[in-house]
Image: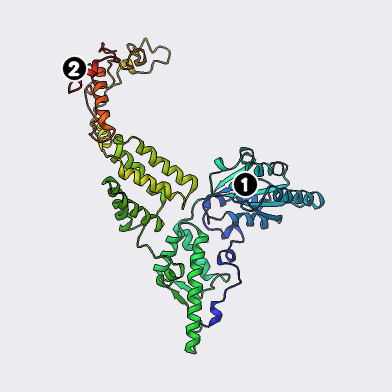
């Protein structure tokens, strides 16, 4: 291979050179590109519907905007919400209106990162969108229901782009290696190097191409220099880029982690057991390890939500809310910022007092149901909101707890055969220390059983309803 093999088809970055030119070249997003889909109709039918493209970085939002412009033969203008102001927006709109009045030309206005526009800037777009002066194609990585004003959102078609799969990223890499706009078959990746790029990409095609370009350009330049020094060349042989050279070029070590193999299960297992065992530092290590390897962060968040009920439970009732909030933060802001919310939740779960009483309670109740211990609902608890219910005995004798001084009355709630069955047995950690006393008090009143334990007297003290007949 001579020095010319290091040259590529132009000075633009690889991701820009390989930008798809039509819908059939777009990787992923099959749910938006099928026959008759709104986006395909916009491209092929010349529709005037404005669209908001919502999705993670590198999923094709800018690419789709360019395709819409080229396919419909319209004028194309682009603004970045990072640098453009209201004056810039109005200038483009005035130009578009003039072009339509003079020559009937329509304009596609692409606004990247529209969520960064202020409300005033977004409001400035409304007349042009409503009157059809421009076809707006706006891209955002943030939830548009929070970041885009309602009137603009209601006048646009919202299209959600999904993160690219690993297979999608592999397809992008294959095209980069074979396409004349890329490396035209002069470069190949070892299996390990390919897997490393896929991990680093994290569903972002632009990131995958940037990593590939960094490694490939350094590798081809070094190879050309070596061959020139040797006074010879390898002709048209294909050079293979390995993971060691790739790591050096991108300055990031490969994480030895297979998301579909044993490492996937081993690392997530260690992650859960570290939080269960109270080792926040180890749990953070495994969290970082999974995120760096490109593990689906939603999978991580789901496991944390499960742990919050299974291993913390009522010992810290707020733990579930923290875990759910971390998952919601991930949906709202995405990575890398959401790793902070995930890390905060990991620390909370690791430090929280632990109890498995919740899972033991539901497992015991489920076992009884599966064993056939599920008698009829007591008559006084049945629905009484229909004509003839009283005649059928439904709801007769029900005692409304709010009518009692303490908001609790003696009454049978479980079916016959399960009265007096204890499923929830709280432990002695955290909030469950207090829950134990409250549970004893409620069971004493509801079941009408004699109070037991060191605080038995409080169970029938002031503020509680005296035991009464079963309704």
| Number of the front mark, 2 or 1 | 1
Q: Residue furthest top?
A: 391
User: Residue 454, relative to residue 386: is it above or below?
Assistant: below
How did the renderer colour the structure? rainbow
Q: Residue furthest bottom?
A: 231
Q: Between residues 351 and 410, which one lies in front from this camera angle?
A: 351
Q: Where, by quadrant of the figure, is residue 200 drawn?
A: bottom left
Q: Between residues 328 and 378, which one lies in front from this camera angle?
A: 328
User: In the visual, does 200 lie left or right of 128?
Assistant: left
Q: Where, by quadrant of the figure, is residue 130 drawn?
A: top right
User: In the visual, does 12 lie left or right of 370?
Assistant: right
Give the x, y percent position of residue 201: 46, 60
- Label 2, residues with CA under 10 Å away: few <14, some 14-19, many ≥20: few
Q: Which residue is mark 2?
A: 450
Q: Say which label, 2 or 1, has the lower sequence index.
A: 1
Q: Which residue is mark 1?
A: 117
User: Label 2's element?
Assistant: loop
Which mark is drawn over residue 5? none
- Tags 2 and 1 touching, CB below 8 Å: no
Residue 303 seen anywhere in this rendered image of the structure: no
User: Residue 5, relative to residue 365: is it above or below?
Assistant: below
Give the x, y percent position of residue 210: 51, 65
- Label 1, residues with CA under 10 Å away: few <14, some 14-19, many ≥20: many
User: Residue 104, relative to residue 417: is it above or below?
Assistant: below
Residue 407 seen anywhere in this rendered image of the structure: yes
Give the x, y percent position of residue 405: 33, 13
Query: Which residue is drawn at the image coordinates 49% and 67% (left, top)?
Result: 212
User: Label 1's element?
Assistant: loop
């Amino acid at each position: 291979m001579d020095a010319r093999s290091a040259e590529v088809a132009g000075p633009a970055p690889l991701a820009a050179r390989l930008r798809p030119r039509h819908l059939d070249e777009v990787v992923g997003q099959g749910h938006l590109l099928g026959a008759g889909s709104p986006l395909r109709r916009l491209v092929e039918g010349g529709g005037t519907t404005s669209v908001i493209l919502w999705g993670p970085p590198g999923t094709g939002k800018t690419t789709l905007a360019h395709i819409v412009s080229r396919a419909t033969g319209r004028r194309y203008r682009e603004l970045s919400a990072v640098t453009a102001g209201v004056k810039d927006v109005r200038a483009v709109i005035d130009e578009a209106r003039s072009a339509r009045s003079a020559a009937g030309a329509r304009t596609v206005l692409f606004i990247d990162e529209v969520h960064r526009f202020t409300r005033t800037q977004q409001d400035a777009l409304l007349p042009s969108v409503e009157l059809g002066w421009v076809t707006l194609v706006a891209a955002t990585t943030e939830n548009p229901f929070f970041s885009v004003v309602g009137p603009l959102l209601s006048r646009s078609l919202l299209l959600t782009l999904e993160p690219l799969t690993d297979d999608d990223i592999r397809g992008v890499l294959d095209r980069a290696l074979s396409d004349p706009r890329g490396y035209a078959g002069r470069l190949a990746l070892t299996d390990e190097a390919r897997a490393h790029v896929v991990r680093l990409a994290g569903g972002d095609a632009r990131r995958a191409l940037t990593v590939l370009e960094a490694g490939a350009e350094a590798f081809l330049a070094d190879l050309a220099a070596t061959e020139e020094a040797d006074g010879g060349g390898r002709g048209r042989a294909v050079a293979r880029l390995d993971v060691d050279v790739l790591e050096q070029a991108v300055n990031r070590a490969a994480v030895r982690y297979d998301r579909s193999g044993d490492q996937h299960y081993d690392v997530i297992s260690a992650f859960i057991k570290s939080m269960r065992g109270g080792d926040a530092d180890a749990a953070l290590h495994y969290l970082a390890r999974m995120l760096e390897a490109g593990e689906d962060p939603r999978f991580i968040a789901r496991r944390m939500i499960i742990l919050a009920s299974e291993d913390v439970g009522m010992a810290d009732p707020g733990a579930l809310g923290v875990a759910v909030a971390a998952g919601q933060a991930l949906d709202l802001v995405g990575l890398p910022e959401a790793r902070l919310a995930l890390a905060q939740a990991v620390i909370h779960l690791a430090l929280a007092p632990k109890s498995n009483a919740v899972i033991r309670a539901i497992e015991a109740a489920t076992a009884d149901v599966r064993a056939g211990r599920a008698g009829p609902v007591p008559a006084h608890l049945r629905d009484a909101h229909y004509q003839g219910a009283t005649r059928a005995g439904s709801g007769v004798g029900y005692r409304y707890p709010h009518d009692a001084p303490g908001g609790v009355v003696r009454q049978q709630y479980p079916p016959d055969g399960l009265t007096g069955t204890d499923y929830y047995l709280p432990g002695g950690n955290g909030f469950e220390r207090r829950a134990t006393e409250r549970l004893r008090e409620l069971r004493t009143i509801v079941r009408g059983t004699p109070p037991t334990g060191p605080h038995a007297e409080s169970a029938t003290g002031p503020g509680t309803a005296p035991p009464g007949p079963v309704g």
